[in-house]
Image (cartoon, rainbow, N blue to C red):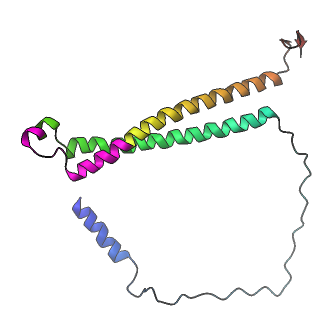
Amino acid sequence: MKPLALGAFVFTLVAGASDATHAQSHIVVEPPATPPTTRPTRLPVTPPAQTTPSIRTFEGNQREELAWAARRSRNFLIGMSATTAVGAALVFPAEVNQCISAEVAEIAGVRRCTPGGTAMLVFGYSALLIGIVGMLASGLAFGINRALLRRIENRAAHKKSRAFRWDLASSRFVF
């Protein structure tokens, strides 16, 4: 691993900026382009079509808000999953490679983990705990928001249905 890091360092030194670049070298600014002497041709402009603003219903607003909340909770769930993965990626290698068992450390009279292992465990367990709690909370919020959104969409689909059915509210058949 050390030769790879050394090779990357040498490559960045060789491929980096030349020795002639200094912080006090002058910056060349190009003069502004001169406007053309001929008159530019104009494209025909058509005004946008006049559309009537759609009337937003309460259910439409509620659906949009639930869709936004579901998207936000899904993104939070993805972020907390990544946090859990990072925490696990820090904890498990530290436990295996950087630390010894508590019984052996007590018998030998040495510290359980190396300083690097201790740091990995502190940050790893913190990220793991925060990620798991966040995943549970955002997973619940995501499920609830999706269920409410699905209920609104089913209700809207039922209202738009033109099939011959019995309407409970008016106690009659409707089309």
Could you tell whether 36 is left or right of 7 in the image? Answer: right
Q: Which of 67 and 42 is in front in this view?
A: 67
Q: Which residue is drawn at 19% across and 46% down?
A: 113
Place residue 167 in its image quadrant: top right
Please provide percent x and percent y for residue 26. 51, 90
Q: Which residue is drawn at 47% across and 35% down?
A: 135
Q: Nearer the viewer, residue 118 or 19?
A: 118
Please provide percent x and percent y for residue 46. 91, 61
Could you tell whether 152 is left or right of 173 in the image? Answer: left
Name the main secondary structure of what is drawn in magenta.
helix
Please provide percent x and percent y for residue 133. 45, 35
- The region drawn magenta spans 106-126
Quadrant in which the N terminus is drawn: bottom left
Is 119 contained in the magenta span?
yes
Please provide percent x and percent y for residue 101. 16, 37
Is 112 contained in the magenta span?
yes
